[in-house]
Image (cartoon, rainbow, N blue to C red):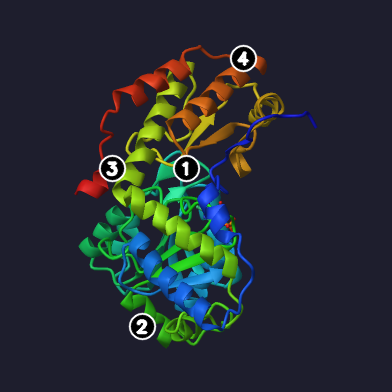
Amino acid sequence: MSLHTGRHFLQIPGPTNVPDRVLRAMDMPTMDHRGPEFGALGLEVLTGIQRIFRTRQPVIIYPSSGTGAWEAAIVNTLQPGDKVLMAETGQFAVLWRGIAEKFKLDIDWIPGDWRRGADLDLIETRLAADRTHQIKAVCVVHNETSTGCVTHPLEVRKIMDRTKHPALLMVDSISGLGSLEYEHDAWGVDVTVAGSQKGLMLPPGLGFNAVSDKALAAAKANPGMRSYWDWMDVIAINKVGTWPYTPATNLLFGLKEAIAMLEEEGLENVWTRHRRHSAATRAAAKAWGLETQCADPHAHSPALTGVVMPDGHDADHFRKVVLENFDMSLGTGLNRIKGKVFRIGHIGHFNDLMLMGTLAGVEMGLDLAKVPHRTGGVMAAMEVLKGRDVVPMPKAAVA
Ligand code: PLP
């Protein structure tokens, strides 16, 4: 292991860098999770997190990773044999499908090439054809972290309204929330799944389900088996700011601070900042002459950029060169794009100069790893940042 000075650059698309303020907030003695002090904290984070999801409905917070929150969304609302429409956007859509399979759901799978968001035309065709409303839920990944492609939940909602389909809309915004524009209530999302370790700037360990009235009604009527994940048990005791089991107390202190930071900056500014950094990163990739994994200009993720390696060059070898020389971690390609793609995370606690350092590390790494490219990516990114151009809101957001 080589010796490095200064700070490590953690530029994977989650877990993301945890701000010192959040680290300090978590540096607390453990406390009585049934005492009055904890109840006040519980109530504060439970209402604070509603503002981040933009919902007036309950948000269930689990001591879990995002995978647990995926499972919770399924077991609360669905039972074996229920039909669900799921769209292949990348590895995380594939993994969510894997959970649905284990719970013996009947999956209608819309295939995808991992280079764009969910195929909206096919979603519309399948919903329109389902006249007897066998499909109980439509599940999409908002920000597909394995590819850097976005599926706009509002566009899916509009299709569901157009086809008058009563299925639940379930959105995985694990790497979207706190980085990409998100409106749980206004977009008519029934279950939003999220995690702590991305835009919320916390360490891994909290999973979230934001729910709608309709999702709660589905859960109440659902006889399927569940215990730990049962929304109703958690919601009932959350009224006094506590949980039915031992919550992740110190992470909740961190969550309170992270919410404060997001609100001090203003959520709209957080979203704009992510879009700027994404635009600058794409300018760099273009100048290097490297393709982005996301091939749809309307679907580029504000949170991360997947970069395609030229044929004959291994992305993981390149990442190793960058790590060893510059102490910077870049995201690996997952599953079918392993070795072919590396991912630059520009998500969470991040600023212009951190982005410039990141892109400089990539450009120097391309050189050292002898990956064919043009120089000038860092300069191109700098031009975008200097211009302070207003990066337009994605189509769905302004519709
Ligand atoms: N969904 C998305 C979009 C993700 O990015 C991740 C993790 O990176 C997950 C789900 C799974 O979350 P976890 O690894 O916290 O279980």
Does dot 1 land on a helix, a strand or a loop?
loop
Residue named by callout 2: 217
Determine the residue positioned at 46% across, 13% down. Answer: 376
**Where is the N terminus found, in terms of image quarters?**
top right
Distance Cα–Cα, label 4 vs label 2: 57 Å
Residue named by callout 1: 347
- Tell me which numbered mark, 4 or 1, is placed earlier along the sequence: 1
Amino acid on which disc 4 is placed: Asp
Amino acid on which disc 3 is placed: Pro
Residue named by callout 3: 394
Determine the residue positioned at 57% across, 40% down. Answer: 12
Task: For residue 152, say whether it is visible.
Answer: no
Residue named by callout 4: 367
**Residue 202 pos. (x, y %):** 54, 55
- Tell me which numbered mark, 4 or 2, is placed earlier along the sequence: 2
Image quarter of residue 55: bottom left
Distance Cα–Cα, label 4 vs label 1: 25 Å
Task: For residue 102, say whether it is visible.
Answer: yes
73, 3: nearer the viewer:
3
Q: Which mark is residue 325?
A: none
31, 87: nearer the viewer:
31
Whether residue 300 is situated above or below residue 59 in the rendered picture = above
Does dot 4 land on a helix, a strand or a loop?
helix
* Figure quadrant, ligand 1: bottom right
Amino acid on which disc 1 is placed: Ile
